[in-house]
Amino acid sequence: MVLIHCPWCGDRAELEFRHCGEAHLVRPADPAALDDAQWAEYLAFRDNPRGWARERWRHVHGCGRFFNALRHTLTDRFAATYKPGEAWPEPPA
Amino acid sequence: MTRLATGGRIDRTRPLRFSFDGRAYTGFAGDTLASALLANGVHLVGRSFKYHRPRGILSAGVEEPNALVEIDRGAGRREPNARATVVPLVEGLVARSQNRWPSLRFDLAAVNGLASAVLGAGFYYKTFLGPGRDAWHKRWEPMIRRMAGLGRAPEAPDPDRYGNRYAHAEVLVVGAGPAGIRAALEAAATGARVVLCDEQAELGGSLLAEPSAWPQLAADLAKLRANPRVTLLPRTTAFSYGLQNFVALAQVVEATGGLRERLWQVRAGRVVLATGALERPIPFSGNDRPGVMLADAARHYVQRWGVLPGRNVTALVAHDTGYSAAFALQDAGAAVAAVLEMRATAPAALLAEATRRGIRVLANHGVSATRGGQRITGLLAAPRGADGTPDAARATPIACDLLLLAGGWTPSVHLFSQARGKLRWDAALDAFLPDEVREAVTCVGACAGEGLAPGLPVTQLAAGSATAHKAFVDQQNDVTTRDIALAVREGFRSIEHVKRYTTNGMATDQGKTSNMLGLAVVAGQLGRSVPEVGLTTFRAPYTPTSFGSFAGRHRGMLFDPVRTAPLHDWAMQQGAVFEPVGQWQRARYFPRTGEDMHAAVARECLAVRNAVGIFDASTLGKIEVVGPDAAVFLERCYVNAWRKLGVGRCRYGLLLREDGFIYDDGVVGRIAEDRCHVTTTTGGAARVLHMLEDYRQTEFPDLRVWLTSTTEHWGVIALQGPRARDVLAPLVEGLDWRDFPHMAVAECRVAGIAARLFRVSFSGELGFEVNVPASQAPAVWQALLQAGAAHGITPYGTEAMHVLRAEKGFIIVGQETDGTVTPEDAGLAWLIGKAKPDFIGKRSLSRPEMLRADRRQLVGLVPRDRSALPDEGAQLISSADARVAEGHVTSAYRSATLGHPVALGLLAAGRARLGDTVFATRLDGPPMALEVVSPVFVDPKGERLRG
Ligand SMILES: [Zn+2]
């Protein structure tokens, strides 16, 4: 069981968290201004990296807060977790 | 008897009786089942998986592929596939052999040679995927089911208890052999918290077969035992190594009347792996006969258990340690007929010692065949040719009742590999050794190659065996060298593919004795080196782990929590029939004497339509949305216009996902300018709160609004029916009835209890939902029942609730919707706040696909014959012989109110097809004709609920 570092609560067991998909997707301010292709891009198209991925997580059985994480999809290793709105950290070399 | 008069670590003052296949035997405290059987001269202990060949005891540890037995401790406690080599003997132990019929000594499948003729490499693949698929069902499967299989699973529930414990340690040491004990002592000396576990019942590992080391072992263990910061765990297998040094241990406790097993989950600062090494068997023709045993295992039986497993011994050695075993057996009284040295020359010192002992050593020799039925009686010793093949033409017969195999050593890197450590091939040691790893883990002792000397390389061990008849590599799965060679000839190159095709290493022993040999055979066939061929992945669990230890206390009532509504106990007393709704148990109907479900539901429905019904709606999800921006927040999320919703009013709301499909529905009541009471579906409560929190925190962080789940805080009592107000009104204080129309909400008192009273209807009748603190709900319920007695108040359950709402065409999210239904499809587009620039899912609703005229739309369906009930889930087709589905039936009920069945369905362009006939498929007959009608069957103008 992986320990995940909640930016508010600290290290907690994986069981307390829920994965919430790709991070740093911003909901368009005016969806009506988007054509169908642009809306589809926001709605459905996701990166599926082999390696470091920027993801959203929620400490759902803890403080309930959403946050972002840099996780490796092969090793399951978390390089960093950070609060929404904070700049994303660079992946480790 | 083959028990020695002295020696070993068994307690000869404590005899233990046990039985094997119904025969009574005696062993001693300290025995394993295997050592006790050998002490009684029992070598034949099982039949092999595929070919039903007689098999004996190969090893003295967890790697055992053959000696799999059934341990019977009574009903629900029958354990199949126990390795006799690790089962501690206890008084009264009942063990049985497996895989034999009618008896272990006389097995029909083996006599007929049935299996060996057909079950070659890739049998399963060829039969499943090829033209033989039909034959599989008709012929092979029934036959294989009779013949093969690994023991019998118990039928009765397991009466034992299983525990679970989390632990933290600065240092976790896996393996209590010499290296592990040294590591534990060193760590303990620094004051660290240490956990030392070992899979065997007795700590000591290889030291247990070294009598001269016993005094020091006892002293070391005493020192560890006396240290309160050290936890010693015998019979505890580290079987899984997860990220961040999270190691799972399976401990067999077997406390009388207490725990049977305990699962430990240990987070360790540092893990020390002292997992030792396993001896390699040797492939040659007939290498699986009972009496063929790993050399070091035989030495253990002598030194540790005081058992002489054979009196007339031959040893086939490819490694120096084989000599130590042969000498130990000779010292214990056995005659050693010969040592067959596979290497070109025997090491000088060992040769000299053998000569001194009068033991004949034949260098550059192998075994071309063995003799014997249920135990080995002899072998053919043959000089090895240039390619390693034993030359049968020049073979010498040697009589023996025990053949020792010393094929060299394979470090146990299973856990290190599970820790995602990289392995490197050490050419000098001829073994994979631990290399780089990210976890804080250290390998010590034999698993790191320490103290191991090289022997004959494994490729040469296997050289020439590929043509041998019945030279077994994987004895548990009955895989031979020929099977592996055939797989290579058929084009398999990757070791992972060869493994799956032949099933080599895929039995419950996970190839502990077969993986390296299998690799060597493949390497030989391909003319490549072992590291070029690669290594299969090591996966958890290291050894078979019981379901019980994983389940722990999570069984029976504790398997999944049961949620009960405030009126649950009352409903139980009334004899309600319950149904599970997610984790909730809800009263489905309240049968009176002699009533079946249909009769009860019909009575309950008619009571609501004609008088008044009372219903526990407490399982509805509830979210309190509070803050100056509460209405703005809901405006952005739900499709409806909320800002104009006045205080004291409520509205049916619809929530979509961004893809435009219906996600949930419920009623939103405006309690105050800055406070809304939101209800969700029973099943949707958690996911709706999650979704709303997501938008609140990440998309609309500027809004001043807070969400709190209040699902379990409010008890909700629904009163529905034309007499509902008559029942309720006398109990209400502080409400202005003149300003309480349909879709109003007010805070008042009901039966003296502070309440939020909603005037809403999910039945189409005049309706109220009384929200009171859950703890007060039973009292209010009783007050309403009393007040309603004169009006014929009738409790009703979820089934009547479903019928009543279907008669009104009200959808149930998840029944009428399936994640592909838009508001327009469901006939709910009128809910959408047209002036709103945006809400969740709005943009998706204007995608071309969402605007198609042939989308499936909610319709009502009535059987043409007005009697038969269509199946929920039945496909809708346009004619009785049509092959294309145009929708499906979502709900279907008998309607007592209308006197005929009613159904709802999704039908392509359904609203334009009112009056048409469509057909619903049936599993048990021809399609059923249905008339397409409006989904609102009762009171289409909605006059009743405004009454
Ligand atoms: Zn947290």
Image (cartoon, helix red, strand yellow):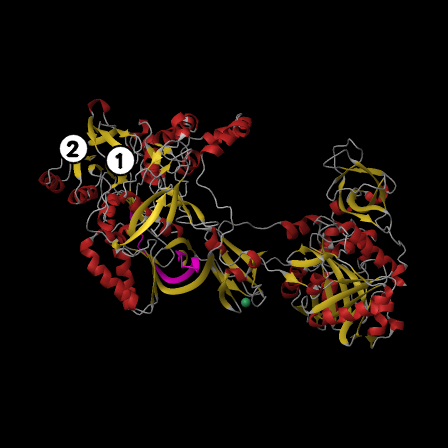
Task: State the residue lying farthest toward the left.
Answer: B356
Quick one: label 1, few (<14), some, or many (20+) residues within 10 Å?
Answer: many
Q: Mark 1 points at which residue?
A: B461
Identify the residue under disc 2. Answer: B362
Q: For the residue with label 2, is its CB less than 8 Å from the closest atom of ligand 1?
A: no
Note whether B689 is above or below B275 in the view shown.
below
| Viewer-nearest of discs 2 and 1 | 2
Question: Considering only order in the chain, which callout, 1 or 2, is on the residue closer to the N terminus?
Answer: 2
**Percent from the top left, x then y, of residue B78?**
45, 47
From the viewer's perspective, tell me whether residue B338 is left or right of residue B882.
left
Disc 2 secondary structure class: strand
Q: Give the range drawn in magenta.
A: B251-277
The amino acid pointed to by label 2 is Leu
Toward which corner of the image does residue B766 lie, by quadrant? bottom right
Q: In this rendering, does residue B533 appear at all? A: yes
Mark 1 secondary-structure assignment: helix
